[in-house]
C-alpha cells in the first residue's frame, strides 16, 4: 500500500491584482497570484503557470459594455482635449474568451493582451453628436502606454448630419501585441477637433484571432 509524504518546501505566493502587474518587477522564481492567473518570474518576464497553457490559451472573444454613459447621461468631450474613451465594463460577456487574462480592464480602462505576437481584432461602437457638426470631427486612436506606438491605428470620425443629431460609430481595428503591450496595455483615446461633442452607449468587442503560443 503506497503512502504519501509532504513536499520539502512551502512556497510563499504573493497576492496581487492584474492592474498592479505592470508596476512589479518579478524576481526569478518568485510567484504571484491574481484573481485571473498564477504567475512565476522567469527571465525577467511574468509567465502564466495556471490555468494550463493547453486549456486556457486558445482563441476566443469577449464583449465589454459601458453602463455609465448612456442616452440619459452622455459623456461631454471638450474641444481639443484628449481622453480615454470611457468604458467601465459594467456588463461583460466572457464565457467564450478561453484565456486566463481579460482582453480589457474596466477599472484601468486598458486594452490587454495575453502573449507577445498575438493578433486581435477589436470592434468599437458608440453613439455620438456635436452641437457644431459642420466644424467638428473626432479623432479616435489606439495608444500604447509604453513602448511601441499604436496610434497609427486611428480613425477620423465626421458628423454627416446636423447639429446635435445622433450618429452611430462602428470601427474595426486589427493589431498585434508586443511585449510592451502585454506588460502595460494600451488605451482607446478620443479627441474632438473644431468643437465639443458627446459620446454614449460605448461597447468593445475583442477577439483573439491568433495565439502565438499555440
Image (cartoon, helix red, strand yellow):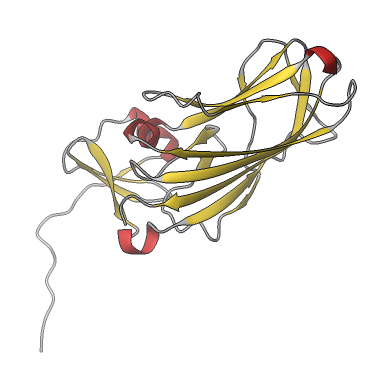
Residue furthest front as drawn: 160
Quadrant holding the N terminus: bottom left
Q: Nearer the viewer, residue 122 or 53?
A: 122
Q: Is residue 135 above or below residue 22?
A: above
Q: Nearer the viewer, residue 100 or 15?
A: 100
Q: Is residue 199 visible?
A: yes
Expressed as whole percent of the image width and height from the top left, the position of residue 80 reads 67, 10
Q: Residue at x 39, y 23 (%)?
A: 146
Q: Residue at x 30, y 52 (%)?
A: 213
Expressed as whole percent of the image width and height from the top left, the position of residue 176 reads 42, 39
Left or right: 41, with 206 as reference point? left
Q: Residue at x 35, y 44 (%)?
A: 115
Q: Nearer the viewer, residue 96 or 134?
A: 134
Q: Residue at x 10, y 84 (%)?
A: 2
Expressed as whole percent of the image width and height from the top left, the position of residue 190 reads 63, 23
Q: Is residue 52 visible?
A: no
Q: How many marks?
A: 0
Quadrant holding the C terminus: bottom left
Expressed as whole percent of the image width and height from the top left, the position of residue 132 reads 85, 14
Left or right: 65, with 30 as reference point? right
Asked which quadrant contains residue 171, the reply is: top right
Asked which quadrant contains residue 125, the reply is: top right
Amino acid at each position: 500500500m503506497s503512502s504519501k509524504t509532504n513536499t520539502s518546501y512551502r512556497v510563499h505566493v504573493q497576492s496581487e491584482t492584474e492592474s498592479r502587474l505592470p508596476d512589479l518587477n518579478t524576481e526569478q522564481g518568485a510567484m504571484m497570484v491574481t484573481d485571473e492567473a498564477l504567475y512565476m518570474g522567469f527571465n525577467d518576464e511574468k509567465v502564466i503557470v495556471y490555468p494550463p497553457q493547453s486549456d486556457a490559451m486558445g482563441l476566443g472573444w469577449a464583449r465589454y459594455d459601458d453602463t455609465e454613459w448612456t442616452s440619459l447621461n452622455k459623456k461631454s468631450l471638450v474641444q481639443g482635449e484628449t481622453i480615454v474613451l470611457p468604458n467601465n465594463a459594467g456588463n461583460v460577456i466572457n464565457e467564450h474568451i478561453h484565456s486566463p487574462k481579460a482582453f480589457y480592464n474596466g477599472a484601468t480602462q486598458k486594452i490587454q493582451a495575453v502573449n507577445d505576437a498575438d493578433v486581435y481584432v477589436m470592434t468599437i461602437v458608440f453613439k455620438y453628436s456635436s452641437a457644431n457638426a459642420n466644424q467638428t470631427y473626432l479623432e479616435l486612436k489606439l495608444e500604447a502606454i509604453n513602448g511601441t506606438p499604436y496610434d497609427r491605428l486611428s480613425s477620423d470620425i465626421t458628423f454627416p448630419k446636423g447639429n446635435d443629431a445622433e450618429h452611430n460609430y462602428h470601427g474595426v481595428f486589427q493589431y498585434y501585441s508586443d511585449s510592451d503591450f502585454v506588460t502595460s496595455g494600451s488605451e482607446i483615446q478620443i479627441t474632438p477637433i473644431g468643437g465639443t461633442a458627446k459620446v454614449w452607449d460605448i461597447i468593445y468587442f475583442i477577439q483573439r484571432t491568433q495565439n502565438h503560443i499555440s
